Image (spheres, grey):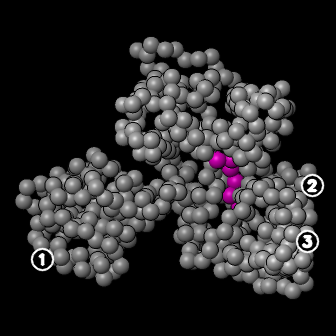
Amino acid sequence: MRILLVDDQKSLRRSLSLMLQGAGFETEEAQNGEEALFLLAGGAFDLVITDLRMDGMSGIDLLREIKQANPRLPVILITAYGSIDSAVDAMRLGAFDYLTKPFSEQDMLEKIRASQAVLAASGATPPGTAEASRKADDIVAETPQMRATLIKAERIARTDISVLITGETGTGKTRVARFIHDNGTRRDAPFISINCASLPENLLESELFGHVKGSFTGATESRAGLFEEADGGTLFLDEVDTLSLAMQAKLLSVLQEKIIRRVGSNKGRKVDIRIISASNQDLGRLIEKGHFRSDLYFRLNGIRLHLPPLRERGADLQHLLQGFLAAYGRKYGRKDLRLTPRAEAYVLGYGYPGNIRQLESFVEQMAVFAEDSGRIDIDALPEDILQHAVPSFAPDSQAGPPESAGSIAESERRMIESTLLRSVNIGEAARTLGIGRTTLWRKMREYGLHFEPGGRSR
């Protein structure tokens, strides 16, 4: 955790810095509010601790400036002139907490750790903080349902119970699995992830359990599987619903015995791992159809976390949109990448069947076609948004909303069909849609769509 200390008295600033460094934090010092703003503009911090009364810019004025630039960066104020009025002013302006001199080291550390806990529970690291710069896979959680999900995930992380994460493709299941691992007792051990739909069954078995030399054609040397690599840590099984019944039986055996056997070997190896799995299918329905083992389901479903689709997360959509605009603005050299009100109405009015992954893909396309000034109008929007979004326009807007695209399912079908028509192969279509090939094939079967080489579908 990187902390910026602001105090016009060098001795007090230095003693606080030494205390926090001794507690394991990284610190940087500023002698006044102006210097603090300069450091904040050029570097990433997780917390600001500032004196209330300083020559020049006061701590309250600094707090005001910080909250205007980065509303979610925590600020703790300290002062020898504690009063109810100044405390009320500070908290009303968004201070995280308030300490009166003299304070103990324990008091300060409790405030700092409380700020860490609040950020972890929200799941959304403030943009521009050190933690955000270290961890690219932030989870935005502004909506109540996502906040509740991440608070639950943090509690789950402290245990070793198996977790089943459900939700549509692109909702962030891998990120939540990683969040659970990173906040648990196994955080210093490996986190190994595999998409169960990515390999045919014979290769998947070798990938998971390993193999011995000569066990099959091409096995020129013995190799450890992912269960062994994850020993002591976490194994994340994505799209676990795609496993064959035979593979399900082998997986169940490992979960029960905690012993794996490499392909071609009778020798067992004990493993200690936590299993987190994910599915975008209803496993209960698959059990009813005989496609998924109920005994494996109960092993995997120690606790279930469901991630809502992006279309149900309005506030999260807006934060993700701004985050992606900033990221791709930097990538493509446009510092002020921004949507016009008309373009934003279209972007926010789209259903995003591919969820967060699709949103990110679309924002990158917008960044490529943005004006040199960074302005993005409707002519830079992906065709699918223009065809299928149902924007809400301000009364003085010059453009009216397009015809309704009907149900979300019908919008998704038309979007996939139009993408297939413009693509030369399935891989290109999947990348454009922001989904995996396996998911695209499944959607095509669901909607009765077929692809022919040369970018034609019927």
Task: State left or right for residue 97 relative to residue 267.
Answer: left
Q: Position of residue 443 (x, y in %)?
A: 78, 39
Residue 49's image quarter? bottom left
Toward the viewer: 434 or 96?
434
Q: Position of residue 169 (x, y in %)?
A: 68, 47
> Which amino acid type is shown beneath numbered disc 2?
Gly
Q: Position of residue 423 (x, y in %)?
A: 72, 32
Say which residue label 2 marks. Answer: 290
Say which residue label 1 marks. Answer: 11
| Quarter that holds the N terminus | bottom left
Q: Is residue 59 visible from the viewing direction of this image?
A: no
Q: Position of residue 64 (x, y in %)?
A: 22, 49
Residue at 59% from the left image edge and 17% from the top image edge: 402
Is 164 magenta? The answer is: yes
Residue 12's image quarter? bottom left
Toward the viewer: 106 or 328?
328
Task: State left or right for residue 416 relative to residue 25.
Answer: right
Say which residue label 3 marks. Answer: 216
Marks 2 and 3 sit apart, C-alpha to C-alpha, by: 30 Å
Q: Secondary structure at mark 2?
A: loop
Residue at 36% from the left image edge and 31% from the top image edge: 373
User: Residues in magenta?
Assistant: 163-170
